[in-house]
Image (spheres, rainbow, N blue to C red):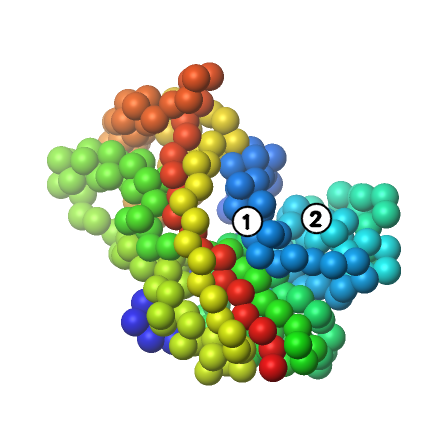
Amino acid sequence: MTSDAAPVPDDPAAWTGERVANWLRLSAGLERQLAPVSDVLFAAAALAPGERVLDVGCGTGPTTREAAGAVGPDGSVTGLDVSAGMLEAAASVPVPDGAAPITWTPGDAVTWDAPAAAFDAVISRFGVMFFSDPAAAFATLAGATAPGGRLAVAVWARRDESPLFEVPLAAALEVTRAHGVADPEGLEPDGGPFSLGDPAAVTALLERAGWSDVAVTPHRLALPFGGGLTPADAAATAAGFGPNRILFADLDDDVRAEAVARVAEVLGHHVDGDGHVVLDGRIFTITARRG
């Protein structure tokens, strides 16, 4: 990313139907995979009892519920997401005892009619990289934040800096290219989920949107693929997520099977003592303040 205009992200309308169902089926494992990311995000956010928190792109609500526990019964938390299916799943999980009440709100930060100065903290774990208009979205979030309030989000670095994505993608591409399959559009290392992976550009973007004291902190985290999967299971899962989802979308069955087998073979070189795939992911925590 070289300016405040990120590459075109996924269409929010795509977060329906089978894509949501697939995410829900694997959500428990994905949450275990992303637990290290939550740890650094909440350390950066430093939520305090009684605060009002907005969780952007909250999905099924794991970080929203964690925020509710952090701010306690005197605080409040709002989870914002474009997917009605995700929010329905989120609302079905009880709020922990002693946690703040949670409001689940459907909406896109680009067009959301946000309440002015309603939040002390805005957080997000991988929910801000898909905005169709990043400048408008971050300006909306700034307007929804009280003076002195803060932003704390976790985003991916460029895809080619994370073995979590690069290793299975490279293995699959070996097979598809050998079969003469053209690389599909959407595999840019700075597109979609990786669109906020340029620290200088994201700093400029946030400052223009009304944020100050922007800080971008890198982290390299060991992430258990799918929450703890064998190479075979991890390869099958990889076919439906991240850049491999784009690559595998229209493959013939025989090429797909060969690609999954090759990914499993390569992932076999990245296992822990229990035989589960573990790969590094490079992320940034981005913090800023509302003046």
Q: Amino acid at mark 1?
A: Val
Residue position for label 2: 66
Residue drawn at x 60%, y 35% as measured from the top left: 28
Residue 48 in the image, given as x and y percentages of width and height: 74, 59
Q: Quadrant of residue 6?
A: bottom left
Horizontal arrangement in the rendering, residue 201 relative to residue 207 (left or right): left
**Nearer to the camera, 216 or 81:** 216
Q: Residues within 10 Å of mark 2 (few under 14, many from 20)?
A: some
Q: Amino acid at mark 2?
A: Glu
Rendered-image quadrant of the N terminus? bottom left
**Nearer to the camera, 84 or 253:** 84
Q: Is residue 98 above or below residue 29?
A: below
Q: Quadrant of residue 272?
A: top left
Residue position for label 1: 40
Horizontal arrangement in the rendering, residue 88 relative to residue 34 (left or right): right
Mark linked to residue 88: none
